[in-house]
Image (cartoon, helix red, strand yellow):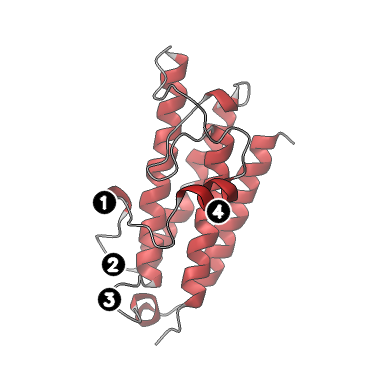
Amino acid sequence: MSHLNQLLEEVALARVRYSNAVSKLTDQQAQWKPSPDVWSALDNTEHLYWAEHGAIWGMWRAYYAKRAGSPVWEGELIHKGLPIETIIERTWQPKEKVPAIAAPRMGGPLAFWLSAFNSLQQPLHDLSVALANEDHESIIHPHPLSGPLDIHQRYEFLRFHIDRHKDQVLALELG
C-alpha cells in the first residue's frame, strides 16, 4: 500500500470515528451549546464539511496548477518532513479563529451535514488516484494557519482535524 493510500485510509477511519460519535445524538443534543462561544456538535459537523471541502478543492487546484507549470505556492518548505502534529504545535494558538469560509453558518439537520461530510471521502479517494504517480512533496497547498503543506501533510491534517473535532464533540456535556 502506498503512503498516500495509507493516509487516505486513516482519513476514512477518522471519518468513521467522528460519524459514530455524532450519529447517535438527537437533534436537541446536536444543537446544544454549553455557552455561546462553544460550538455544538452540529456546528462542528458543518465546519468539518466546509473546511474539508475547501481543502480537497485546494489540493485538486494545486495538483492541476503544478501540472500546468504554475504552482499555487513556491518558496521555502518550512515544514518539510514534519508530521502534522508537530506543525500544528508550532503554528496554532490554543483557540484559533476559524476562517470565514470554513465557519458553520447554515445550521439545519445534523443528518444532512453528516451525510455531506461523509460524501467527501469520494473526491479525496479520486484525488489519491490522480496523484498516484506524482511527487507528493512537490504539490503544495498552503493552510491558512500553518502555511505551506505538501499533499501528505494535507491528508494528515484532514485526519488530525476530524479527530480534533470528534474530541470536541465528545467533551460536550450534552444537555
As helix, strand or loop, the secondary structure at mark 3 comes to loop
Mark toward the viewer: 1 or 2 = 1
Judging depth in this view, the residue of 161 and 75 nearest the camera is 75
Is disc 2 surrounded by few (<14), some (14 to 19) or many (20+) residues within 10 Å?
few
Callout 3 touching callout 2 (CB < 8 Å): no
Distance from disc 2 to disc 4, alpha carbons, whole Å, reads 25 Å
As helix, strand or loop, the secondary structure at mark 1 comes to helix
Q: From this viewpoint, is residue 87 visible?
A: yes
State the residue lying farthest toward the right. 1
Distance from disc 1 to disc 4, alpha carbons, whole Å, reads 20 Å
Q: Earlier in the sequence, mark 1 or mark 4?
A: 1
Q: Earlier in the sequence, mark 1 or mark 2?
A: 1
Q: Is residue 173 above or below residue 135?
A: below
* Residue at the spot 44% in from the left edge and 55% down from the top edge: 117
Q: Which residue is mark 3?
A: 36
Q: Is residue 20 left or right of residue 144?
A: right
Q: Which residue is mark 1?
A: 100
Q: Which residue is mark 2?
A: 108
Q: Which mark is residue 167?
A: none
As helix, strand or loop, the secondary structure at mark 2 comes to loop
Amino acid under label 2?
Answer: Gly
